[in-house]
Amino acid sequence: APVVELRKVSQLAEAIKVMSIRGSGAIGIAGVYGMLLEAMNTRGDRGAVIQSGLELKATRPTAVNLMKTVDGLIAFVKNCPDSGFMELFEDRACDILEEQLAFERQLGKNGAELIEDGDTILTHCHSGALAGSGFGGRALSVIRTAFLQGKKIHVFTCETRPYLQGARITAYELEKFGIPHTLITDDMSGYLMKLGRIQKVVVGSDRVAANGDLINKIGTYMHAVAAKENGVPFYTATSSHTIDFTLQHGMDLEVEFRPGSEVTHLNGQLITSENTEALYPAFDVTPNEMISGIITEAGVIRAPYIENLAKLKR
Ligand code: RUB
């Protein structure tokens, strides 16, 4: 995998924008370490650190982890005593990472209970590895935990046009973990469900609304529709960090639209005529009634979601 060296917050912000760093958990943690980087570069200039948090927050608007972790750290910076600021800030950043890794492992265990021996699981995009977690992100944490429990499972990973995260990253990680898998294109899931070849869907999440609506990578909704039609349970693997209690309904969120050129080009090559216009909503909304359960560190949350998710509020 290519290594990107980032020494300034502006470089980190650019890396998030162009998706060198991507996935809700990973960009949340990048926000934390970006602010720490700024603190180190400026020898603890609080104004600059707060400003760097705002710059990072503006990079990608849909995933809520980045917003929440940066807002939490801005409040921490404002209230932190002067003496030992750098040390306290570093400890806080490490605590956030440790907590998220612990959540990732725990939700993996909770979700693995839903997976049965012999299941083929569909996943979409890349529910992305937090550095060093060894588990491979939240959907993959569920899948890998089930695999490590000795369950014989198979994974269908969707290629996830136009950015190909599922093909490029999920397939790579599944191979690294030794989990049997097959790459499919995004339009194949419905038919494969009809053939009885998919028993569960497990995807990650960029944001979960207070009512349980799921905002995740474009194409997720399409899989959920097919899953409902075919009686296949559909789960999202997430954590309490990713629930946005200020968002009542998923459709109230304005999701990120990325440049159409990311659709008309593949690996830098134009694949359409020069005049073709393309649209790229990067995320979609899956209504709560299509979700069989929301897998979190606190257990698998079931409907009614408004009441049951509210118990995770902190
Ligand atoms: C990634 C995406 C992933 C979720 C999963 O989108 O939608 O499914 O972020 O989150 P992008 P996590 O590649 O545009 O960032 O990795 O936290 O489980």
Image (tube, rainbow, N blue to C red):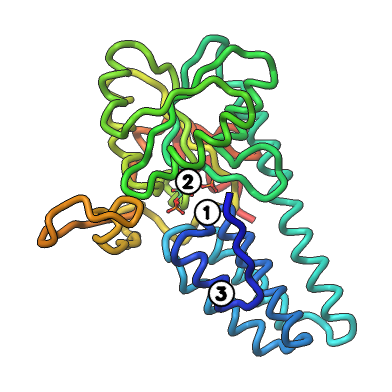
Determine the secondary structure under disc 3: helix
Q: Nearer the viewer, residue 73 or 191?
A: 191
Tell me the quarter of the picture where residue 292 sits. Answer: top left
Location of mark 2 (residue) = 205
Location of mark 1 (residue) = 24
Furthest toward the front, the residue is 269
> Is 53 rendered above or below residue 244?
below
Disc 2 within 8 angstroms of ligand 1 (CB): yes
Tell me the quarter of the picture where residue 179 sits. Answer: top right
From the top left corner, tell me how far across and down residue 159 is, in percent.
38, 37
The answer to the question of whether label 1 and label 2 lie on touching residues, with beta carbons closer than 8 A, is yes
Location of mark 3 (residue) = 11
Q: Which of 249 and 124 is in front in this view?
A: 124
Sequence order check: which comes first, mark 1 or mark 2?
A: 1
Type of residue at label 3? Gln
Sequence order check: which comes first, mark 3 or mark 1?
A: 3
